[in-house]
Image (cartoon, rainbow, N blue to C red):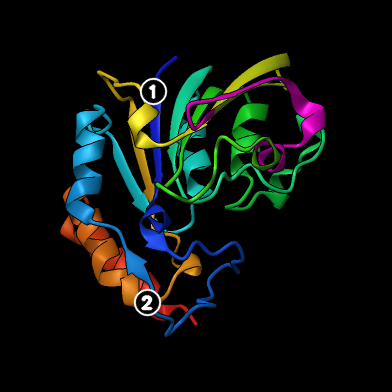
Amino acid sequence: MGIYVDIDLDFLVKPIKQEGVNNKRLYKGEECFVSDIEEFILNLKEHGLLNTKQKKFFTNHKKSYTYWWINRSLNNTVIHIDAHSDLYRNKQENLTLLKDTDMNCDDYMWYAIRDGFISKIYWVVPYNSYNLNNPKVAEKFVPQKLVKSINIKNNCIDYTLEVITRLGIKNIEYSILTFENLPNFKEIELLTVATSPEFYSEKADTYIFKALSLLGATEEELERIKKFHEKMI
């Protein structure tokens, strides 16, 4: 059991785009707004989310699952900092029916739950992105037939999800909140960071790479990711 921090840097970019195609920049040339990078890093530090020596940087967010699989640690808590839940597509209680070949950046979290790597999730959403006090909004985030209980208060949604995993029937604690309601943590086992360029204009890239650098990416890692961004259609 440990604490994983899983960041998608599209968290910083508005407007939030819901549609993406792997390796394509659908929003090329569009104007966008990027949140204050230093404030973002400060929020992470204040919550203890950068207290780790193990950091991984990449473009496609489903790569997080790969590093969790390599660790093979069970029942971890994930602090998922993202504009998107990445619990999309799946509607079924029985997660053992999921096929590995179908895994994508929008649903890899289900696979991690299926394999027992995750038992608790904090999804940290950008400020003013969702009205978390609205029950109708809460109904849209996860399939309602998986919800065992739900509590909505103080701009925070707490679910208990019941699903069938490879380790049997499991209850998954799932909270949706903003940084202001997130607890502090002392020690992080692994930090994974995705850039997800499919979900914003290349005009945000300068800020995205500044964030990568402040998060601890090496020059070699920065260059590798830059080349991937530049090659995208």
Residue 138, position in %: x, y?
A: 65, 36
Residues 141 and 189: in front is: 141
* For residue 88, above or below residue 120: below
Which amino acid type is shown beneath numbered disc 1? Ile
Give yes or no for residue 20 being in the magenta stretch.
no
The residue tagged 2 is: 202
Say which amino acid is labelled 2: Glu
Mark 2 or mark 1: whose residue is earlier in sequence: 1
Give the position of the N terminus as an image quadrant: top left
Dot label at residue 118 = none
Q: Which residue is mark 1?
A: 3
| Label 2 to label 1: alpha-carbon separation | 32 Å
- Residue in the picture at 60% in, 69% down: 21
| Proximity of marks 2 and 1: CB atoms separated by less than 8 Å | no
Judge whether 122 appears above or below 223 on screen: above
Q: Secondary structure at mark 1?
A: strand
Q: Residue 148 placed where, x, y %? A: 74, 18
Task: Give the magenta part as a residue range.
Answer: 138-156
One can see residue 143 in this view = yes
Where is residue 105? Give x, y as percent: 57, 52
